[in-house]
Amino acid sequence: MEVIIAKDRQELAEIAAGIIREQIRRKPNSVLGLATGSTPEDTYKRLIRYHKEEGLDFSKVVTFNLDEYLGLPKDHDQSYWYFMHDRLFNHVNINPSNIHVPDGMAPDPEAFCDWYEEEIERAGGIDLQLLGIGGDGHIAFNEPGSSLASRTRVKALTEQTIKDNAELFFGKDKQHLVPRFAITMGVGTILEARKLLLIAFGKRKASICKKFIEGPVTSMVTASALQLHPNAIVVLDEEAAAELEYKEYYKWVQKMKKEEYQKVLDRLAQ
Ligand code: F6R
């Protein structure tokens, strides 16, 4: 796992958006896995800017979102479908038929989940999956105890997730309005992406970041499954990185990569 520590939220978003821009430039028909929530908002703003100012081309990009609340229609202003259109899709030249967000109103949610898995496969698999992390260590809505081999399915949300989402999206006193279930990609589905990019910022995420990066791999902290992936990048700001035991080492590795590694390669090539 590569751990990059940015000085603040802005730098974090710049690094994350830079990695996604690079992916799209290298492979214009990239299949991107996308996340919602407060964490990727600044990253999406930067991608919109790259589209408007530099012509970053989304016309061949295919996207699959991680999750959606069960029972919320697309046009509900708290649905993830709405969030993604509002924060990204409506502002770039993506082809609407290339967008996939789980359907929270699917009459047979389990059949829908199987279809979603097949669609990912038909698209050739996910090239780059963007992830946030919940306070309980979840990636997508894989709450504690989710199998590390799980596939797209319906999950019951934990009390903490319901509370966090109530505060962030619905207002503190609206906890009763947060849906209790979601359709979510599984941990196994996520681990099949060719590259993972998890981002997190703020003090609120510091203790869970220490757990998933430096603690054991466990289904009780599903983000710890990133340790099993050969190509996972984690970008944190200083606050989210505050409790990492090897924080200075991660910074040193990044510095050496920038300054020294090329010199070593040059020397070996002589
Ligand atoms: C959203 C998702 C969730 C969030 C996580 C963090 O699509 O999959 O796992 O990434 O709950 O949410 P924020 O970014 O709001 O702290």
Image: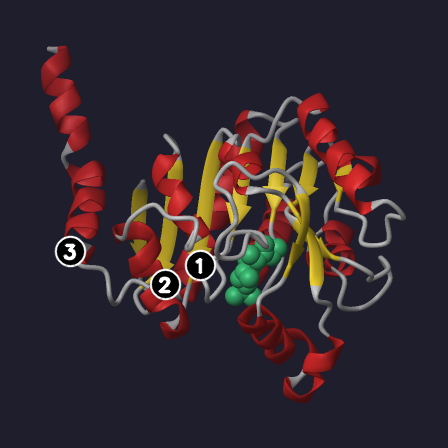
Name the amino acid, label 3.
Answer: Glu
Describe residue 99's horizontal placement relative to residue 22 as left or right: right
Which residue is at the front of the view, 141 or 60?
141
Which residue is denoted by mark 1 in the rendering?
A: 137
Sequence-first disc among 1 and 3: 1
Regarding residue 60, the answer to whether it shows in the image is no
Give me the residue at 41% from left, 43% from top: 225
On the image, numbered disc 2 is attached to which residue? 208
Disc 3 secondary structure class: helix
Location of residue 172 with respect to 19 vertically, above or below: below
Residue 118: image location, x then y, percent: 73, 27
**In the rendered view of the protein, which quadrant contains the N terminus?**
top left
**Quadrant (top left/top right/bottom left/bottom right) for the C terminus:** top left
Circles 1, 2 touching at the beta carbon (< 8 Å): yes
Instruction: Give yes or no for contact between labels 1 and 3 (Cβ–Cβ under 8 Å).
Output: no
> Which is more N-terminal, label 3 or label 2?
2
**Label 1 or label 2, whichever comes before in sequence order:** 1
- For the point 68% across and 44% down, the residue is 153
- Confirm if mark 3 falls within 8 A of ligand 1: no
Q: Nearer the viewer, mark 1 or mark 3?
A: 1
Tag 3 residue: 248
Give the quarter of the image for residue 112. Answer: top right
Give residue 245's position: percent from left, percent from top. 17, 59
Front-most of residues 92 and 133: 133
Return the x and y of residue 198 as percentages of the image width and height: 45, 49
